[in-house]
Image: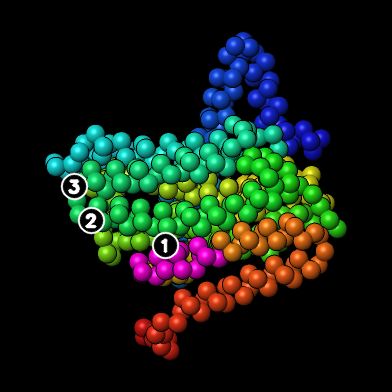
């Protein structure tokens, strides 16, 4: 019975395809998969915006949305329907385009951002046998389409004919390029161990248990460091705090989408959140076992439930970080990427090679952990030696 529940979406898809002519089955299969993605993840985006506002309000001891309820339900005047008026406002708000702007490029920029993000979902294994496009170079495809986001950011900043937009675009591109390097290098360690770029194979390699505990790569020294590096880089790639400098309101208004309003701005907003979900999904696949259960006695829970649960849990960590950490300066952001994360990611690749060739005894745990810890201490001291940090004093308003 549990197997049928786990494969219910796959079974329904095959049932529908049974009524379609064989020549049209690949096309209909792709349409069904895309429709499900377009229905589920924008829905998660709408719900997450509410929990983010209410969660940050609770953490910072202030009000979040508390007026708009959900119609025709018992949930009245509690803020959980706030995404409905927000969506209506975005659809009906006036679309203002600067007179000097390149109107064609200005119009295409949010579309160019959204399409690559949606393409990235095609290779993510959301559950057992639940991958839209299961091909050998899935990880390479994910990073390749993700690189198109920088193009959309540049299009938005350049076409607006606005200095603030251009500065925001340049800042965003510099940040994205800088943090893409440790992001990709942290994923290289997994490819070295598994020997495949296929995301389904990466999940299958972690779908084993010893003493009831899963063989997730995050439970290894190189996997833990790779996961942390990937997590930090994904924050920067998603323009999340404390790496939200491209749209720093106190410095450059709203960054590369300063001159965007209405539904175009909503597309940028949607693209950023869907990109965040996609990169979190990739991190789950690489280091947290994808759709697998952390313990063997819970494998009866459907695989897609595990995937979504892990994703939502990490999203809440992102919200927690946004509510607590202040924004970095630009020099701090670049120093972190090039002076700490990049060398540590390169050393972690060496550690993964040592892990692979040292066998399976306890000595490799000791050696790999010692190398990583030593590298972190040396790099951290080198990064902080020129910093003049005084004693921090806290003052509270009366």
Q: Is residue 360 visible?
A: yes
The residue at the point 25 percent across, 39 percent down is 106
Q: Label 2 neighbourhood size at 10 Å, few (<14), some (14-19), many (20+)?
A: many
Helix, strand or loop for disc 1: loop
Q: Are marks 3 and 2 in contact (CB under 8 Å)?
A: no
Q: CA distance from mark 3 to mark 2?
A: 9 Å
**Position of the N terminus by quadrant:** top right
The residue at the point 35 percent across, 66 percent down is 330
The residue at the point 72 percent across, 33 percent down is 7
Along the viewing direction, whichever of 196 and 78 lies nearer the viewer: 196
Along the polypeptide, which appears first: circle 3 or circle 1?
3
Along the polypeptide, which appears first: circle 2 or circle 1?
2
Q: CA distance from mark 3 to mark 1?
A: 25 Å
Magenta span of residues: 329-344
The answer to whether 331 is drawn above or below residue 393 in the figure is above
What main secondary structure does the magenta stretch of the protein show? helix
The answer to whether 220 is drawn above or below residue 312 in the figure is below
Measuring from the top left, give residue 319's x and y in whole percent.
50, 60
Measuring from the top left, give residue 110's x and y in whole percent.
34, 40
Is residue 160 rendered to the left or right of residue 178?
left
Q: Which residue is mark 3?
A: 161
The residue at the point 55 percent across, 51 percent down is 280
Measuring from the top left, give residue 340's x and y in whole percent.
50, 68
Q: Which residue is mark 1?
A: 243
Say which mark, if any, is on residue 164. Answer: 2
């Amino acid at each position: 019975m549990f197997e049928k529940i786990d494969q219910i979406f796959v079974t329904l898809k095959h049932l529908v395809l049974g009524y379609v002519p064989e020549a049209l089955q690949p096309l209909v299969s792709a349409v069904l998969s895309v429709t499900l993605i377009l229905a589920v993840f924008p829905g998660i985006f709408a719900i997450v915006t509410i929990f983010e506002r209410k969660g940050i309000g609770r953490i910072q001891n202030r009000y979040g949305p508390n007026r708009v309820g959900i119609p025709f339900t018992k949930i009245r005047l509690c803020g959980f329907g706030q995404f409905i008026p927000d969506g209506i406002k975005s659809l009906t708000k006036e679309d203002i385009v600067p007179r000097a702007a390149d109107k064609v490029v200005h119009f295409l920029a949010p579309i160019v951002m959204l399409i690559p993000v949606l393409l990235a979902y095609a290779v993510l294994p959301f559950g057992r046998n639940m991958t839209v496009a299961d091909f050998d170079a899935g990880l390479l495809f994910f990073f390749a389409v993700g690189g198109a986001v920088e193009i959309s950011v540049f299009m938005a900043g350049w076409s607006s004919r606005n200095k603030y937009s251009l500065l925001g675009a340049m800042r965003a591109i510099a940040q994205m390029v800088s943090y893409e390097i440790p992001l990709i290098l942290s994923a290289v360690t997994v490819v070295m161990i598994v020997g495949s770029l296929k995301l389904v194979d990466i999940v299958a390699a972690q779908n084993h248990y010893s003493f009831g505990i899963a063989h997730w790569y995050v439970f290894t020294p190189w996997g833990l460091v790779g996961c942390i590096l990937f997590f930090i880089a994904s924050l920067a790639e998603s323009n999340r705090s404390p790496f939200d400098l491209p749209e720093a309101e106190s410095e450059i208004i709203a960054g590369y989408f300063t001159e965007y309003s209405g539904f175009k701005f909503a597309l940028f907003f949607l693209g950023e959140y869907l990109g965040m979900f996609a990169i979190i999904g990739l991190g789950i696949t690489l280091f947290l076992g994808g759709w697998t259960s952390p313990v063997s006695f819970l494998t009866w829970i459907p695989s897609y439930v595990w995937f979504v649960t892990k994703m939502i849990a990490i999203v809440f960590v992102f919200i927690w970080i946004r509510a607590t950490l202040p924004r970095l300066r630009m020099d701090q952001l670049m120093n972190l990427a090039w002076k700490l994360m990049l060398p540590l990611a390169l050393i972690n690749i060496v550690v993964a090679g040592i892990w692979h060739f040292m066998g399976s005894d306890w000595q490799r745990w000791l050696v790999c952990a010692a190398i990583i810890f030593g590298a972190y201490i040396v790099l951290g001291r080198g990064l902080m030696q020129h910093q003049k940090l005084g004693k921090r004093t806290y003052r509270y308003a009366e």
